[in-house]
Image: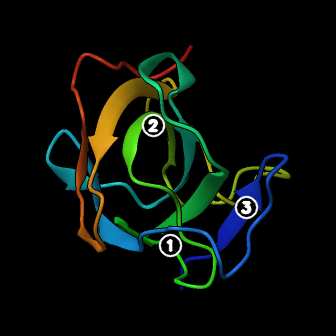
Amino acid sequence: MSLLLCIGVGGCNSGDSTVHLTGHVTHDGKPVPRGTITFSPDTQQGNSGHGSKAIIYDGTYTTQESFGLVGGPHMVRIEGFNGVAHGDNLDGKLLFKPHEESYDLPMESGEYDFEIPPSDKKPR
């Protein structure tokens, strides 16, 4: 089950105009076993509001409706792990360097998938 954390000064409350997203996260066409997605409204493109973070589990993520996120332009950071516990890291080893990209997220709840480009090589 995915979890969502709200981050930022504004906090989360039921009065926010938020959307609930769910979807798949893949890298090289394969589901990302474990990871995180951090959503930060892109203030350079005029978007504001609280940020959010969703957990990737077996290639899927979901934001909890009680927290949600604002739609529109976002800087999105995705970290993916192999899911095999390694030392103190229960998520395992990184599959690719953290991927950061600007996305225009939907203004209504629904599905939104992320594909990490193959050019994002594994970290050394």
Which of the two discs, 2 and 1, sits closer to the camera?
A: 1
Packing grade of label 1 (10 A; few <14, some 14-19, many >=20) is: many
Vertical relation: 1 (above or below) 12: below
Residue occupying the point 62% across, 47% down = 49
Residue occupying the point 26% across, 55% down = 106
Three-letter code, disc 3: Cys
Q: Position of residue 120 (x, y in %)?
A: 34, 20
Which residue, given by chain and number where applicable, does mark 2 sit on?
95
Which residue, given by chain and number where applicable, does mark 1 sit on?
63
Q: Is mark 3 on a helix, strand or loop?
A: strand
Q: From the viewer's perspective, tell me whether residue 50 is left or right of residue 64.
A: right
**Considering only order in the chain, which callout, 1 or 2, is on the residue closer to the N terminus?**
1
CB contact under 8 Å: marks 2 and 1:
no
Estimate the spatial distance between the alpha carbons at disc 2 and disc 3, rounded to whole Å.
25 Å
Residue occupying the point 73% across, 76% down = 13
Which label sits on residue 6? 3
Residue occupying the point 55% across, 80% down = 64
Three-letter code, disc 1: Thr
Q: Position of residue 74 (x, y in %)?
A: 44, 36
Question: Which is more toward the observer, 56 or 20?
Answer: 20
